[in-house]
Image (cartoon, rainbow, N blue to C red):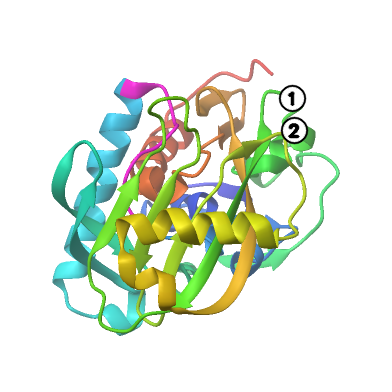
Amino acid sequence: MGRVLVVGAGVVGLTCAVRLLEAGHRVDVVARDLPLETTSAIAAGLVLPHRIGPADRVSAWTARSEQVFTDLAADGDVDAHGVRTASGTVVGEGEREAPLVDMPTFLPWLVARIEALGGTVTRLNLSALPAPGGELDVVVNCSGLGARLLGGDRGVVPAAGQVLYVDLPGLDRWCVDAGDRAGDEAPTYVVPRRHDLVVGGTHDEGEWSRTPSPPVAAAILARAARLVPEVATARVLRHKVGLRPQRPTVRLERVGRVVHCYGHGGAGVTVAWGCADEVVRLVTEPVADVG
């Protein structure tokens, strides 16, 4: 097996690196932002597809990821990887069970898995994708929003998502209102993590600012309190804004010796394992250099 360089250290890049290492490749991950600095670290971690396409591929990727996360949750070692399952409600659809992934725990777990398998994760600010050649057989582009520069893809745009983290011990159910009805585009969600509760959110395409807005935070809390009344009196711990890499459809394809895997919007956690398995297949299959 050859050497693979993964560009991007969000949940998709790290998951691809794990699967490639498990398949026997030599893998190094490089990224401007280390895992806990990425948008993935801000995510609520509910495994539920939203505003991501194409639908048929997303369905398959999600099913695979759900299985992997369910298996992790079943081992009971939530302190190690932060994965469990919980019941919740999707407004307009009803009750369901879904994996919850505590990202501040899960991302370091992925890094530890990479290092245990002989891979590395290194901070490196790139101005272009490295060119495969010599000992470098394939580059996997998981650069998210960075694909605007590194992949030359202006179809990837930021979709700012503001969330609050609140102190509400004892809540173990999640609730989501996708916000696609009657012209209301703002998603609202309340997702319990191990040590806090994620309350969101917004989906502002084209917005680059990572500065939280107090009026927006107040509106989020008001909407969330209609779903979960206890939120109205919960103590707010902090505010965050993440820039989701939004694209009309995910780009997952091989071009010569570069595999592109980006444009997952706010569903990177949801499809990561499914996409990673497809990346391994694309890296492993012999493909002529065409670009």
Q: Which amino acid lies under the numbered mark 2 shown in the image of this protein?
A: Arg
N-terminal label among 1 and 2: 2
Residue 14 point in image, percent of width and height: 51, 57
Q: Which residues are magenta?
A: 46-55
Q: Secondary structure at mark 2?
A: helix
Contact check, label 1 and label 2, Cβ < 8 Å: yes
Q: Is residue 259 shown in magenta?
A: no
At x 32%, y 49%, the residue is 176
Q: Secondary structure at mark 1?
A: loop
Compared to residue 47, the image places residue 137 above or below, namely above
Residue receiving disc 2: 148
Which is more toward the observer, 17 or 143?
143
Compared to residue 118, the image places residue 243 above or below, namely above
Residue receiving disc 1: 154
Which is more toward the observer, 183 or 104?
183
At x 47%, y 52%, the residue is 25
Compared to residue 277, the image places residue 123 above or below, namely below
